[in-house]
Amino acid sequence: MVLLVLAKAWCGLVLPKLSGTVRSGASQIAKEAGEGLFRHIWEQFYPAPDFFGQKDRGNSQEQDPSYRTAREVEAFFREHEYLEIYGDEETWEMGRPGSQLAKKDEGAGAEEGRAEEGRAEEGRAEAAESLGETKSSQDGSQREDAFLGSLSEENPSGFSGEGKAAPANSLPQKRYQLAQLEDYDFLMSHFYNVHTSTTADRQLMDVKKLLKKNFALYPKGQAEEGQAEEGQTEEGQAKPQILIYHTHSQEAFSDSGEGENIVEVGTYLAWLLKEKGFSVYHDRSVYDVREGKLDRNRAYTYALEGITKILEENPSIQVVIDLHRDGVKEGTRLVTEVNGKPTARIMFFNGLSQTPDGPVPYLENPNREDNLAFSLQLQLKAEAYYPGFARKIYLKGLRYNQHVRPCSCLVEVGAQTNTYEEARNAMEPLAELFQMVLRGD
């Protein structure tokens, strides 16, 4: 009311005394001010409805939450192509959708992990015979003796007999009934972390189908009956069965000295597997350094070129292991104790070549089901013989070169906060796990 009186006084007393030009300008200002005042008062009682995608807030434009979310999701899926080139599979990364899932297995999620462990204890029972967990440690020792043979290479420096991986020397401690594993919710909550870049539905995670797959290899230098000649080269040497390589060869550990990196950890794994009778090709190529500088932008592309050539020249290779070291938040320690030794925890990692919207067309993987079966069988052996050694299997949306063979496996060994000794010690139980699955034990 007061504003109306003032406006009337202005128009009746002030405006007539002004010159024509000034009066015209003042009238226009008064008119605009009046319209603005009227609009402001009107909107207080009758606010205008929001229109799609944004809201009017004075001079600023704020995106509607649903619209903003859609834009963020769109940007995330555009990121897939970048990630395929960069190939960064570390699970600690913050700021990306789903990164909080990784913390469940890290120090930040220790309480949740302990609670989950308690729930798992309630559901444990005698394993079904179909899981193959009923053999004794004595049988395991006999199998090891039967498959040991002469090494194709000399014992690497520093690897003494005392460093050999001890066979599983106790009865299985964590065993599951098949009915438990067929429960999709139980399976996913106990054995997997799923990044939001992908999805793993019930049809894909068919436990019966995954556990029926047989990955047994034959002792070094031997092949199926009637095919013995295919097991050796012309020089009489055993043809390689297992390839170990490192997409990120420069990954090191908290106390690493010169040359003490993931490649040397792989050298120890190769030696242990050879002692168990396998023929191993260890590729020490550097795929993440270009022109003397660390360059991980295209490491997976370079690695694929390298291992493709190796596999073409060695078609006898049936198992491909990409050995990595994970990255976690500082202060997180992925360590346990195995056979009285401080041991870095490991993690099996699967790329599913699909986003929640469906398959990634440029990342076909005809071996995806076999890859999943291989890692799950390894995980179950780890649960049975080395509880706490293996973290949950990590699933992500890209491929990570796991399409090259049915038995393709990416393994994360500890993290940058582990010591070199802890990482090296982890190869002993890991070699045992490979022997169990690849011998069909």
Image (cartoon, rainbow, N blue to C red):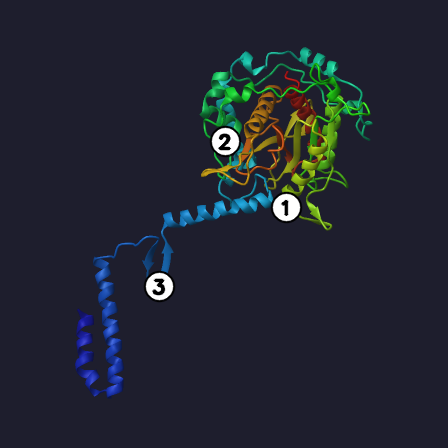
User: Nearer the observer, disc 2 or disc 3?
Assistant: 3
**Residue 126 spot, x, y in % from top left:** 53, 13
* Residue identifier under label 3: 59
As helix, strand or loop, the secondary structure at mark 3 comes to loop
Answer with mark 3 or mark 1, whichever residue precedes in sequence: 3
In three-dimensional space, the C-alpha distance between marks 2 and 1, rounded to whole angstroms, equals 36 Å
In three-dimensional space, the C-alpha distance between marks 3 and 1, rounded to whole angstroms, equals 45 Å
One can see residue 41 in this view:
yes
Q: Residues within 10 Å of mark 1 (few under 14, many from 20)?
A: many
In the rendering, which numbered label is found on residue 112? 2
In three-dimensional space, the C-alpha distance between marks 2 and 3, rounded to whole angstroms, equals 46 Å
Q: Are marks 2 and 3 in contact (CB under 8 Å)?
A: no
Q: Is residue 236 left or right of residue 208?
A: right
**Residue 53 spot, x, y in % from top left:** 35, 53
In the rendering, which numbered label is found on residue 120? none
Q: Label 3 is placed on what type of residue?
A: Asn
Label count reads 3
**Residue 19 spot, x, y in % from top left:** 24, 88
